[in-house]
Image (tube, rainbow, N blue to C red):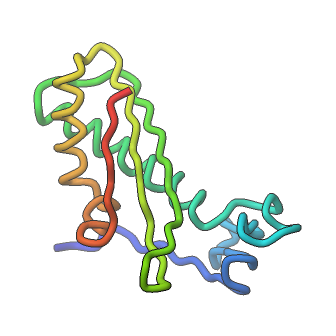
């Protein structure tokens, strides 16, 4: 294996604080939907994760489509990330990935989505603890 690059982010103040990168490309104040008064101050960690996952999975879809001989046009991915409280007092994520693959029939789109889910680094990182539902739109 070879490392292609490493991203670095630093958080202060937890879910109601801030996140920044050392180069300041990322520098945001977080909002916390669970805390009255700051719920819309900025994105939640789940919103940031949804954006990152949708972008990564979108790239994986393009690669999967090529691999399966069905190059897709401009693909759109919508990620829904939910914070769930489990029965043991802990927390976990639930994810739904919706994809639009123009010009691809539903059955082939589902195959492409499943292949992308096997290869996407974010999907791999979530295996075992987070259920990810794939939906063809």
* Quarter of the C terminus within the rendering: top left
What residue is at 50 percent from the left and 73 percent from the top?
85
Question: Which residue is at the far top?
Answer: 103
What residue is at 31 percent from the left and 42 percent from the top?
134
Question: Which residue is at the far right?
Answer: 37
What residue is at 63 percent from the left and 75 percent from the top?
21
Q: Give the x, y percent position of residue 36.
A: 84, 69
Quadrant of the image occupied by residue 40:
bottom right
- Relative to 59, is 105 on the left or the right? left
Number of labels in the image equals 0
Of 93 and 53, the residue lying toward us: 93
Question: Which residue is at the far left?
Answer: 68
Q: Give the x, y percent position of residue 47.
A: 60, 57
Of 115 and 66, the residue lying toward us: 115
Q: Give the x, y percent position of residue 30.
A: 73, 69
Q: Give the x, y percent position of residue 49.
A: 52, 61
What residue is at 48 percent from the left and 39 percent from the top?
78
Quadrant of the image occupied by residue 34:
bottom right
- Relative to 83, is 57 on the left or the right? left
Query: Measured along the vertical axis of the image, is residue 73 above or below residue 122?
Result: above
Of 46 and 29, the residue lying toward us: 46
* Quarter of the N terminus within the rendering: bottom left
Quadrant of the image occupied by residue 12:
bottom right
């Amino acid at each position: 294996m070879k490392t292609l690059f490493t991203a670095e982010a630093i958080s202060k103040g937890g879910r109601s604080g801030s996140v920044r990168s050392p180069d300041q490309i990322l520098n945001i104040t977080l909002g916390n939907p669970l805390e009255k008064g700051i719920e819309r101050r900025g994105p939640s960690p789940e919103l940031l994760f949804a954006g990152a996952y949708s972008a990564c999975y979108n790239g994986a879809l393009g690669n999967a489509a090529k691999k399966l001989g069905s190059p897709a046009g401009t693909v759109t991915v919508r990620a829904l990330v939910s914070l769930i409280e489990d029965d043991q007092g802990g927390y976990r994520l639930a994810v739904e990935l919706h994809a639009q693959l123009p010009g691809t029939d539903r059955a082939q789109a589902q195959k492409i989505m499943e292949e992308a889910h096997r290869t996407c680094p974010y999907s791999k990182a979530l295996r075992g603890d987070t259920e990810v539902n794939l939906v063809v739109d």
